[in-house]
Image (cartoon, rainbow, N blue to C red):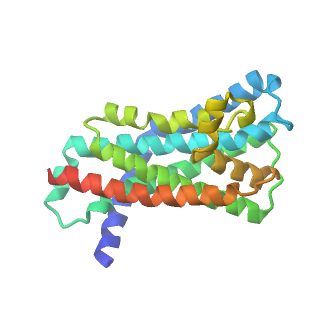
């Protein structure tokens, strides 16, 4: 166990250092959600009726969009390691197979924490007025952390099988697209029946509704338990899948 922890800490330090050097990815993980928030609030917000101030409605969805982008970039980082010869050098060393992926996932969580904090700060400057108590903020942050971990491990698995950085980007595209088929930007009851069914039975909608309820005081109901179940299930499945795909690729 001590060797596994040491291996993971080494790879975490490496991934964080690489993340600091890859400034363009960090900037885009911040700029893209900010631009999307400004677009929906100032361009579309006046025409969308959600029964409350639109910025209070849309910010939780923007946060999920932000975390999706940050997690998707993990696939490209892992794919770059897999195809640049880095993994071949590590194969000759007694390093645990999941340590490399752990480094990338931890760097993704750190990057997401920074970008999400900046996005929330910008949202407050634009008029977002959360009513959450410190405990509710903590619960929302915990759920987002669980969700980011799940997405990051899934992205790491996709990066492990991608043949190039470009294909890793294509494989992880659904992480950016799926929030648009949820309650992130409009209530699900306004959608056509077939889209409403998709929106209400995918993991992002309950996570958004739970975060929205915790931050703005809207009813959470059963969405909290559903969001927790989706996040935990996705995290377990993603971790197992990522490690299995990495080992299969390394041992080929």
**Does the rendering let one see residue 32?**
yes
Q: Residue at x 22, y 41 (%)?
A: 84
Vertical order, 112 against 24 (above or below): below
Q: Nearer the viewer, residue 42 or 178?
A: 178
Q: Residue furthest bottom?
A: 2
Residue 155 location (% of width, % of height): 41, 46
Q: Is residue 27 visible?
A: no
Can you say whether 221 is above or below 51 in the image?
below
In the image, residue 88 lies at what x, y percent?
16, 51
Q: On the picture, is 81 further left or further right than 92?
A: right
- The residue positioned 32% from the left and 32% from the top of the image is 167
Q: Position of residue 77 (x, y in %)?
A: 35, 43
For the N terminus, which image quadrant?
bottom left
Q: Is residue 90 above or below residue 44?
A: below
Residue in front for this viewpoint, 148 or 124: 148
In the image, 83: left or right of 34? left
- Give the quadrant of residue 124: top right
User: Looking at the rendering, which quadrant does residue 181 occupy?
Assistant: top right
Q: Residue at 62%, 55% (x, y): give it.
A: 227
Q: Where residue 206 sits in the image (x, y, percent)?
A: 65, 49
**Horizontally, is 175 left or right of 80 in the view?**
right
């Amino acid at each position: 166990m001590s060797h596994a922890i040491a291996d993971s800490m080494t790879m975490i330090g490496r991934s964080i250092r690489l993340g600091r050097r890859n400034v363009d990815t960090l900037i885009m993980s911040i700029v893209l959600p900010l631009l999307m928030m400004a677009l929906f609030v100032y361009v579309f917000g006046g025409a969308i009726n959600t029964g409350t101030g639109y910025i209070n409605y849309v910010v939780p969805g923007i946060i999920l969009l932000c975390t999706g982008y940050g997690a998707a970039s993990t696939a490209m980082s892992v794919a770059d390691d897999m195809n640049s010869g880095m993994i071949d050098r590590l194969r000759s060393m007694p390093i645990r197979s999941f340590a490399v992926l752990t480094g990338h996932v931890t760097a993704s969580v750190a990057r997401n924490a920074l970008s999400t904090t900046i996005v929330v700060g910008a949202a407050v400057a634009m008029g977002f007025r959360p009513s959450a108590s410190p405990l509710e903020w903590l619960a929302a942050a915990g759920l987002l952390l669980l969700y980011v971990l799940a997405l990051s491990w899934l992205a790491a698995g996709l990066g492990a099988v991608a043949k190039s950085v470009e294909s890793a980007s294509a494989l992880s595209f659904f992480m950016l697209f799926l929030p648009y088929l949820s309650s992130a930007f409009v209530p699900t009851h306004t959608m056509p029946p077939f889209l409403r069914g998709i929106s209400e039975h995918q993991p992002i909608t309950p996570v958004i509704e739970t975060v929205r309820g915790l931050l703005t005081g809207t009813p959470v109901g059963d969405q909290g338990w559903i969001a927790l179940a989706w996040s935990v299930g996705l995290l377990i499945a993603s971790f197992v899948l990522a490690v299995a795909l990495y080992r299969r690729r390394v041992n080929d």
